[in-house]
Image: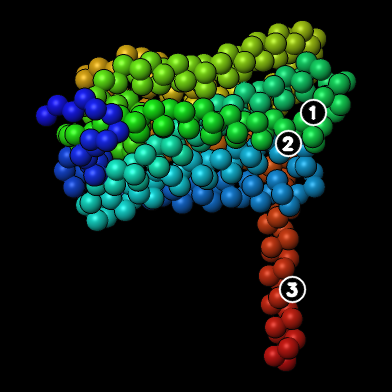
Amino acid sequence: MSCNARGNQTHVTEFILLGFGELPEQHLILFLPFLLIYIVTMTGNLLILALVVADQHLHTPMYFFLGSLSFLEICYTSNILPRMLASAVTGNRSISFHGCFVQYYFFGCFAATECYLLAVMSYDRYLAICKPLHYTALMNTRVCLQLVTGSWISGFLSNSILTLLIASLSFCGPNEIDHFFCDSFPMIKLSCSNSHIERLMTSFMACVTSLIPFMLTLASYICIITTIMKIPSTTGRKKAFSTCSSHLIVVTLFYGSIIFVYGIPQKKTLKHITKVFSAFFTILTPILNPLIYSLRNKEVKEALKKAMHKVTGFKKGFLISQKIASG
């Protein structure tokens, strides 16, 4: 079926997300692992967000950015996993035409925002290690708010352009998206109109939203590592590196998977591996962030211990008051 007009001749009313396999049994097998991942992701990121807000010792730029990242991961995961879980239970893999574009819009916005936010966090670590005497003046509350707000606004603006361009294409069928969520390239492949401009713009915006922040992040860590290597004592080097090692792990995992998915030419032989790497940065990275930061960060662990002591103390006080009241 040919359909060269743009916008007015869209015949597809829904898409079918093929996910990780065509058999319903394959989706049911993945239900429990994905449900567990979603619960742990939400719990871990909500816990970090609560600790950053409640504990005065964590009211620093580093933890302000960490709290912002946790909030972003909550939004990021909730955009994809709940629908996957519902599809696995009901067996209904269809998603409405507009629903697919809404999912892609927010996915792209959150992914772009995370790229910018990770770059901001690396810049924060650069100032803390390379410019320690000027850190407080350079990274004050006003600057932190501006950097986080700028990351969110940039992420949403950049993907708004792409979403409008892809939405202007005509979709006449087929309507099966060989992916587990609505993403740009799998959707463009289904278009029956000339999508050359959209493909070019998608590649261009991918460079703007991921490659530029990645290069800034890389430059920050080159400066950080150079500065750390100049520290004379081994203890001093370990202490300096420990302040940025957690963020470096997150950056490596996130950008490594994104570069594989969007930086390597798409081939049919790699489509299953591409899905795995897509799952890595959309599903697994959000669950790894709180685990990496909480297990490798002394301040977060101390704040968690204090919170648990407070909860335990509250429970004991409540039980004692209940005994007194009943006695």
Q: Residue 117: image x %, image y %?
A: 61, 30
Comparing 175 with 273, the one in front is: 175
Q: Are marks 3 and 2 in contact (CB under 8 Å)?
A: no
Local SS, label 3: helix
- Work out whether residue 281 can be spotted: no
**How many neighbours does mark 1 have within 10 angstroms: few (below 14), some (14-19), or many (20 or more)?**
some
| Residue 54 showing in the rendered view | yes
Q: What residue is shown with label 2?
A: 145
Mark 1 vs 2: CB contact within 8 A = no
Circle 2 residues within 10 Å: few <14, some 14–19, many ≥20 = some
Quadrant where the C terminus is found in the figure: bottom right
- The residue positioned 40% from the left and 42% from the top of the image is 102
Residue 96 percent across, percent down from the top left: 29, 47
Spatial CA distance of label 3 from label 2 is 39 Å
Q: Nearer the viewer, mark 1 or mark 2?
A: 2
Mark 2 residue type: Leu
Q: Nearer the viewer, residue 145 or 133?
A: 145
Name which residue type carries label 3. Gly
Q: How is the image coloured?
A: rainbow
First of labels 3, 2 by sequence position: 2
Picture quadrant where residue 244 is located? top right
Label 2 element class: helix
* In this rendering, the label closer to the viewer, 3 or 2: 2
Instruction: Name the residue that disc number 3 marks.
Output: 317
Q: Residue at x 20, y 39 (%)?
A: 11
Q: Which residue is mark 1?
A: 139
Q: In the image, residue 132 lies at what x, y percent?
A: 83, 21
Quadrant containing the N terminus is top left
| In this picture, residue 187 sits left or right of residue 322 | left
Helix, strand or loop under label 1: loop
